[in-house]
Structures are given as C-alpha cells and as structure tokens.
Image: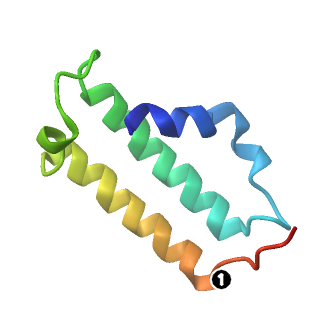
Amino acid sequence: MIVQWEDWVNHSDLDWYCEPVFSRDERDAIEAFHEVWRGVAQDVPDPMPYTVEQLIGTPVWQRLMDAAGVAREVFVRRGRFDDVT
C-alpha cells in the first residue's frame, strides 16, 4: 500500500496534476498528501516487517490516513466525474 502510491505519483511529476483536469486546490491536496506519504514511507522499515493488519492502527499509518482524509475532502467538493468513454 505504501509503495503503490509511488507507482502512480512521483514528486517530479506533480506539475502534471494541473487545470483543467485538477483544480489548484486538488493539486495542492495531492502535493500535501505526497509530503506526508514521503515521511511515512521513510518511517516504515524496509523491508516492511508488518502485515497490513499489524500496520493499521499504528501512529505512522494514522498519519497517512489523516492526510488521505484531508485530501479526500478537497476532492469530494467537486464530486466524481461522469464516466466518459
């Protein structure tokens, strides 16, 4: 779960998340979450000795979840995009 974020978001690529697809607030939320994620990724030992169940509920996991909740609040303001094919 920790590494999967890095598969999709790289700090050097944050400028890609721009208008009109992402609002400035959404981009800022992605960047803020990414900064928390970086700290969490550094605080989790590598290789990670936890199962997911052991990680959930730890202070480091809670930091990540709190940051995700803040970012989510920004994204729900606009809501979901229609499915366009």
Q: Quadrant of the N terminus?
A: top left
Residue 40 lies, in percent from the top left, at 32, 37
Asked if residue 52 lies left or right of residue 11, the reply is: left
Q: What residue is shown at x 74% (from left), y 53% (from top)?
A: 17
Depth check: 63 or 50 in front? 50
Quarter-of-image position of residue 47: top left
* Amino acid on which disc 1 is placed: Arg
Residue 33 lies, in percent from the top left, at 47, 52
Q: Is 66 drawn above or below residue 5 in the view shown? A: below
Q: What residue is shown at x 83% (from left), y 64% (from top)?
A: 19
Asked if residue 15 lies left or right of residue 7, the reply is: right
Depth check: 39 or 56 in front? 56
Where does label 1 land, which residue?
A: 78
Circle 1 packing at 10 Å, graded few (<14), some (14-19), many (20+), is few
Q: Quadrant of the C terminus?
A: bottom right
Q: What residue is shown at x 48% (from left), y 69% (from top)?
A: 72
Asked if residue 12 lies left or right of residue 32, the reply is: right
Q: What residue is shown at x 62% (from left), y 34% (from top)?
A: 10
Q: Is 28 drawn above or below residue 58 in the view shown? A: below
So how many labels did they put on this image?
1
Residue 64 lies, in percent from the top left, at 32, 50
SS of the residue under disc 1? helix
